[in-house]
Image (spheres, coloured by chain):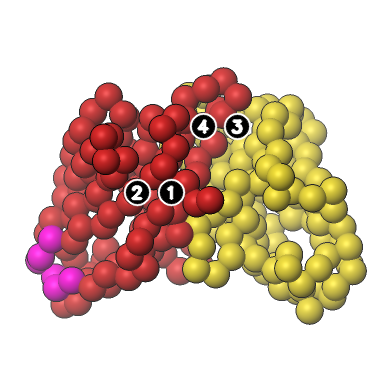
């Protein structure tokens, strides 16, 4: 299967701990996006990469959040000093080209902060 | 301020009938609109899209209509099938170098198609 994959699918952590999520996009896609989704809401944009360059970050992305895409392939999203308000589904998507609006989403990582 | 709104959280229709899902937007810079379908435990899947230069796009049972003056779009599913039961998200993008395909999503409408 050559779709977008995310790991882990579920993560339970205690408040104050750090967590890291991984996303593997479709191999030929040069753009990679991170979204956050909470219950009853649509995905909210967090950040995106074109190849290895992080080109935009939402104001939702506090300084506790950092994302990388070191070789323009997979990406990681790290949350430091997690808070209960960070509990959400974290979705990764990828797309091809500069003006490709269709995004291909992974299954998401569900984070629960206790 | 929510720039993309789906005012109906849920919709229930009978199998074989038409399903109409609605979406409103406020940002005049949006020029490309998409609908995604989401099943439980899966990420959203692209369904159909429309550019602002068109007012209708059709793909099989799915048709999207765009009314730019009203800043309104709708998704029609005819005939509806039980397998169409899912959450449908409306999304909008603005064509600009800095935007780069970033989409703004509505909160979704849960469609239930009853056999």
N-terminal of the pair, mark 1 or mark 2, is 1
Residue B83 x, y percent position in the rendering: 26, 66
Give the mark, 2 or 4, whose residue is nearer the N terminus. 2
Do labels 3 and 2 touch, CB within 8 Å? no
Mark 1 crowdedness (10 Å alpha carbons): few <14, some 14-19, many ≥20: many
Residue highlighted by disc 1: B4
Residue highlighted by disc 4: B101
Q: CA distance from mark 4 to mark 1?
A: 16 Å
Vertical order, A67 against A49 (above or below): below
Of tags 3 and 1, which is closer to the observer? 1
Q: Quadrant of residue B58?
A: top left
Characterize the local packing of mark 3: few (<14), some (14-19) or many (20 or more) Cα atoms within 10 angstroms: many
Residue span colored magenta = B13-18
1 and 2 marks in contact (CB < 8 Å): yes
Which class describes the residues within 10 Å of circle 2: few (<14), some (14-19), or many (20+)?
Answer: many
Q: Which residue is mark 2?
A: B24
Q: Nearer the viewer, residue B104 or A8?
A: B104
| Res. B108 visible in picture | yes
Chain rendered red = B
> Residue at (59%, 65%) from the top-left corner?
A38
C-alpha distance separating marks 2 and 4: 19 Å
Classify A18 as above or below A68.
below
Verify CB contact (< 8 Å) between mark 4 and mark 1. Answer: no
Point out the tag, 4 or 1, that comes first from the N-terminus. Answer: 1
Alpha-carbon span between mark 3 and mark 1: 23 Å
Q: Which mark is residue A31?
A: 3
The chain to which mark 2 is attached is B
């Amino acid at each position: 299967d050559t779709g977008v994959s995310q790991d882990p699918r579920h993560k339970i952590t205690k408040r104050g701990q750090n967590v890291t999520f991984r996303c593997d996009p479709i191999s030929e896609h040069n753009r990679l996006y991170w979204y956050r989704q909470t219950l009853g809401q649509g995905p909210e944009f967090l950040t995106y990469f074109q190849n290895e360059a992080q080109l935009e970050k939402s104001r939702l992305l506090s300084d506790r959040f950092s994302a990388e895409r070191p070789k323009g392939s997979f990406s990681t999203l790290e949350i430091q000093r997690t808070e209960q308000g960070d509990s959400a589904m974290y979705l990764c998507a990828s797309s091809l080209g500069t003006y490709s609006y269709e995004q291909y989403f992974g299954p998401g990582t569900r984070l629960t902060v206790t | 301020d929510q720039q993309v709104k789906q005012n109906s959280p849920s919709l229930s229709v009978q199998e074989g009938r038409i399903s109409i899902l609605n979406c409103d937007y406020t940002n005049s810079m949006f020029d490309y609109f998409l609908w995604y379908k989401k099943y439980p435990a899966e990420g959203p899947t692209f369904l159909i899209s429309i550019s602002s230069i068109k007012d209708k796009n059709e793909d099989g049972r799915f048709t999207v209509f765009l009314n730019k003056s009203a800043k309104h779009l709708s998704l029609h599913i005819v005939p509806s099938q039980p397998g169409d039961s899912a959450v449908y998200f409306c999304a909008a993008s603005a064509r600009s170098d800095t935007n780069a395909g970033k989409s703004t999503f509505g909160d979704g409408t849960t469609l239930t198609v009853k056999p």
